[in-house]
Image: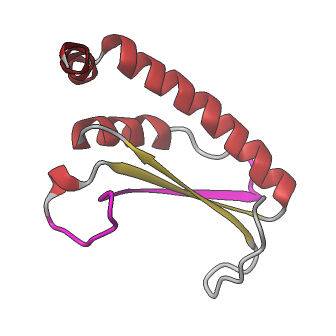
Amino acid sequence: MATPQPSTSDSEFPYTLTIDLPLPTNRLASSALRTLEVDTELSPFVRRSFALTTPNKAATSDEEAKTVLETIYRATTNRMLRVAVNGFMESLGVILGVMEELDVDVLEMEEDEDEK
């Protein structure tokens, strides 16, 4: 359950949730980010931000090492947070499904795993 976390920058949106999604490559993480960020939040009671990070959260200038899509949600209430995250998860499911079915890198990774 999301809990209120005092924020010095945005006290109007006290409920927060961070979702870290590790992906196999920076290209896939970037594609997911670009796909998700075109849809704005429908509710003025929810804010969302995206970033690409490294799996161990270490600061690096190497863009290829940034393979984790970090999504931070902020909302005025738990209910608004839940509704927004449910919609996000549906979109994410579609994006990952398309990547699994159509993306060359993902198909190559599956073939490599099958050979092991």
Q: Reply above or below: 68 against 94.
A: below
Q: Quadrant of the N terminus?
A: bottom right
Q: Residue furthest left?
A: 62
Q: Quadrant of residue 5?
A: bottom right
Q: Is residue 13 at least partly visible in the picture?
A: no
The one of 23 and 29 positioned closer to us in this rendering: 23
Picture coordinates of residue 105 (x, y %)?
21, 23
Q: Is residue 70 left or right of residue 78?
A: left
| Front-most of residues 39 and 53 | 53
Q: How is the image coloured?
A: secondary structure
- Asked if 74 appears above or below 26 in the picture, the reply is below
Residue 25 is a magenta residue: no
Closest to the observer: 75 or 42? 75
Residue reaching furthest front? 116
Where does residue 86 sit, x and y in percent of width and height?
A: 71, 38
Which residue appears farthest toward the bottom when viewing the image? 8
- The reply to whether the magenta stretch includes residue 50 is yes
Horizontal side of 81 relative to 106 (left or right) equals: right
Residue lying at 25% horizontally and 14% vertically, measured from the top left: 114
The image quadrant where one finds the C terminus is top left
Q: Nearer the viewer, residue 55 or 37?
A: 55
- 115 displayed left or right of 44: left
Taking the spot 43% from the left edge, 34% from the top edge, the residue there is 35
- In the rendered image, the vertical position of residue 76 relative to residue 22, given as above or below: below
Q: Residue at x 38, y 18 (%)?
A: 100
Q: Which residues are magenta?
A: 43-61
Point 66% across, 78% down: residue: 10
Residue 8 coordinates in the image, percent (x, y): 63, 88
Instruction: Work out whether residue 11 can be spotted.
Output: yes
Q: Position of residue 11 (x, y in %)?
A: 73, 80
